[in-house]
Image: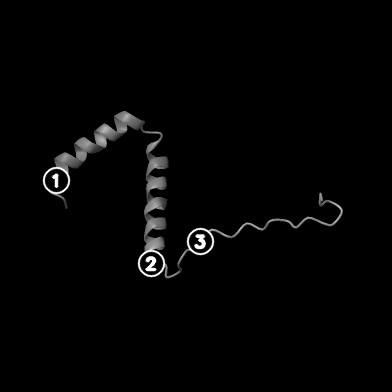
Amino acid sequence: MFGLGFPELLVILVIVVLLFGARRLPEIGSGLGKAIKGFRGGLASDEAIDVTPEKEQVPEESEGEKSS
């Protein structure tokens, strides 16, 4: 697994705890899990997203508003 052993993972965990604090770790883990799940769901989805911009509809002027 990327050449990471137990001592390296332990050092990374200690650094993360020092940076974010023990209280925020569950929030970070939950957010990371949701992001990974959403990313995998997006890859597995067969639906294509249409990003073509819609044409703007210009409202037509009524005869009373036309300036001739």
**Counting other residues with Cα less than 10 Å from the Cα at mark 3, is it few (<14), some (14-19), or many (20 or more)?**
few
Q: Is residue 60 left or right of residue 6?
A: right
Mark with earlier residue (1, 2): 1
Mark with earlier residue (1, 3): 1
Return the residue at label 2: 44
Quadrant of res 59: bottom right
Q: Residue at x 81, y 52 (%)?
A: 66
- Distance from disc 1 to disc 2, alpha carbons, whole Å, reads 31 Å
| Residue 58, position as x, y percentages in the image | 69, 56
Q: Is residue 58 left or right of residue 35?
A: right
Return the residue at label 3: 52
Of 35 and 57, nearer the camera is 57
Q: Residue furthest front?
A: 68
- Distance from disc 2 to disc 3, alpha carbons, whole Å, reads 22 Å
Mark 2: which amino acid?
Ala
Q: Residue at x 49, y 60 (%)?
A: 51
Q: Which is in the foreground here, disc 2 or disc 3? A: 3
Rendered position, 62 above or below 28 = below
| Residue 34, position as x, y percentages in the image | 42, 52
Mark with earlier residue (2, 3): 2
Of 9 and 50, nearer the camera is 50
**Counting other residues with Cα less than 10 Å from the Cα at mark 2, is it few (<14), some (14-19), or many (20 or more)?**
few
- Distance from disc 1 to disc 3, alpha carbons, whole Å, reads 47 Å
Rendered position, 16 above or below 61 = above
Q: Secondary structure at mark 1?
A: loop
Quadrant of res 41: bottom left
Mark 3: which amino acid?
Thr
Mark 1: which amino acid?
Gly
| Residue 21, position as x, y percentages in the image | 36, 30
Return the residue at label 1: 5
